[in-house]
Amino acid sequence: MAFLRFVTLFAVLIATAYSLQCYSQQTNGVDKPTAKMDCTPLNSKYCIKNYVSANGVSSASYGCSPAASCSASGCTSPIKGATVCCCNSDFCNSSSMFSMLPAMVPLAIIKLIGF
């Protein structure tokens, strides 16, 4: 019985040590998030940021991505005025810069090639 407790405790410690940490909060779209959470590696491998802007009002929500929402790092705009960004490093979902990275890489390559 002691061995079973040890194995369970060890598994919990390993899962905690390797869990992704994300910001988890809703903001007005301007303020940076401050609340943090651990994502379980079994159901969330990405942090997510949802940004919506309509009629001059914006909001952003941050958290651990449900498994079906993100399959790779990067941003998409599924509808006008909405942006969904996924990333997979600790606290990566607070930055507005990571949303521009996918657009900047091709531009840098084009600039280097000289088009």
Image: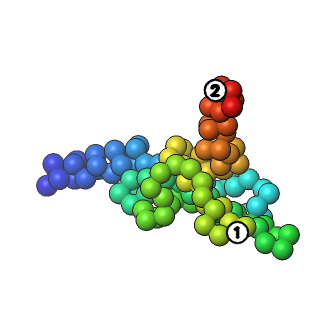
Residue 76 falls in image quadrant: bottom right
Q: Is residue 34 left or right of residue 19?
A: right
In depth, the one of 110 and 20 nearer the eye is 110
Nearer the camera: disc 1 or disc 2 = 2
Q: Position of residue 9 (x, y in %)?
A: 29, 50
Q: Position of residue 36 (x, y in %)?
A: 59, 54
- Which residue is label 2 attached to? 113
- Residue placed furthest toward the right: 56
Residue 95 seen: no
- Give the mark, 1 or 2, whose residue is nearer the N terminus: 1
What number is the disc on residue 109? none
Q: Is residue 46 left or right of residue 84?
A: left
Q: Is residue 95 left or right of residue 44?
A: right
Q: Position of residue 61 (x, y in %)?
A: 65, 64
* Residue drawn at the location 63% of the way across and 26% of the way down: 113
Residue 54 falls in image quadrant: bottom right
Label 2 element class: helix
Q: In this picture, is 54 found above or below 90?
A: below
Disc 1 to disc 2, C-alpha distance:
32 Å
* Residue drawn at the location 56% of the way across and 57% of the way down: 48
In depth, the one of 95 and 53 nearer the eye is 53
| Structural crowding at the residue carrying mark 1, measured as other residues with C-alpha within 10 Å and reported as few (<14), some (14–19) or many (≥20) | few
What number is the disc on residue 80? 1
Residue type at mark 2? Ile
* Residue drawn at the location 39% of the way across and 60% of the way down: 43
* Residue drawn at the location 68% of the way across and 27% of the way down: 114
